[in-house]
Amino acid sequence: MKNFYPTYLYIKTHNKTGLRYFGKTTNDPFQYKGSGKHWLAHIKKHGNDMSTEILGYYTDVNECTKAALEFSKNNQIVESTSWANLVDENGLDGGNTGRTNYTSMSIETKEKLSASKQGQKPWNTGLLGVSPGNRLPRTNEQKLKISQSLTGRTRSPESIKKTADKLRGRPRPDVADRLRGVKKSPETLVKMKAAQQLKGPLSEETKAKIREARKQQEFSKETKEKLKGMVVVVNEQGIIKRITKQEFYSLENKEWVFHNSNEGKRRKGVCE
């Protein structure tokens, strides 16, 4: 194999029969069912009720191979009837090997598949927290294991950009409805203020980008009507919002000040 990808070594245990399977995957080990011929036949017969244990997460090919072979030999996964493995696991064969030469389906094939599925009820209707590889919702223990295995991993700038491009512009009315009218706790406001202070003043480059973005921003007639007579203000925590002019001029204290005043700039952390 030309490339080695970060790999999980895992142990699957069938909760009904007790049969175990030792394998590797570069994907989510809790969703991945395994690829062994005997193991797949076993879960096809007895169901997908299985538990997953993570033996390790490896970014070095030599360490991964050594750990996989040692576990295979020490536990005699081929000889023992307690295991479904037909060959020793070496941490390399099978799974995601980075192949890119798969033939994509033609438009006609996709249309035929779509037509054949019309009217069928999805298998996960009414279920939450499930996937094809794990049709039971994840337990808190599984979630904790995944969290621990992913702690410390960093994503490449390319990966972050791909995710941002995919999600940019996606409407989220459910989130907006859930957050509308929710007031932040004093603890949250303190954390937000501390985060703003750590950012420091905006660079001239960032200010220029913001100005250019606002020049291209277009407001609907409804939005323009809503913004009429509004004033942008900021409080001591650096939180910015819009209030009516009448409300602004009726304030008896200085909790909120005009955002572009000297005091407002100081609160935003951009005062020269």
Image (tube, rainbow, N blue to C red):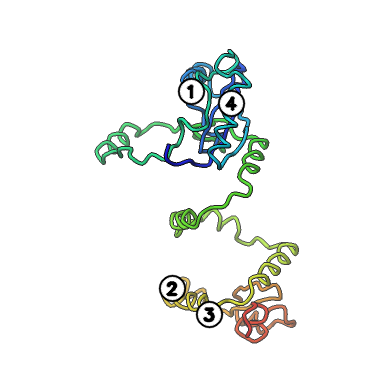
The secondary structure type at the circle numbered 3 is: helix
The amino acid beneath tag 3 is Glu
Q: Mark 2 or mark 4, which has the lower sequence index?
A: 4
Q: Are marks 4 and 1 in contact (CB under 8 Å)?
A: no
The amino acid beneath tag 2 is Gln
Name the residue beneath numbered marker 4.
12
Q: Which x, y percent locates residue 268?
A: 64, 77
The secondary structure type at the circle numbered 4 is: strand
Image quadrant assignment for residue 237: bottom right
* Real-space Cα separation, disc 2 to disc 4, in angstroms: 53 Å
Which callout, 2 or 1, points to the residue nearer the camera?
A: 1
Q: Residue placed at 43% from the left, 32% from the top?
A: 121
Q: Are marks 2 and 4 in contact (CB under 8 Å)?
A: no
The amino acid beneath tag 4 is Lys
The secondary structure type at the circle numbered 2 is: loop
Q: Mark 2 or mark 1, which has the lower sequence index?
A: 1
Q: Are marks 2 and 3 in contact (CB under 8 Å)?
A: no
Name the residue beneath numbered marker 1.
36
Name the residue beneath numbered marker 3.
204
Q: Is residue 107 above or below residue 156?
A: above
Q: Which x, y percent locates residue 58?
A: 58, 39
* Real-space Cα separation, disc 1 to disc 3, in angstroms: 58 Å
Name the residue beneath numbered marker 2.
217
Few, some or many C-alpha atoms within 10 Å of disc 4 (few <14, some 14-19, many ≥20)?
Answer: many
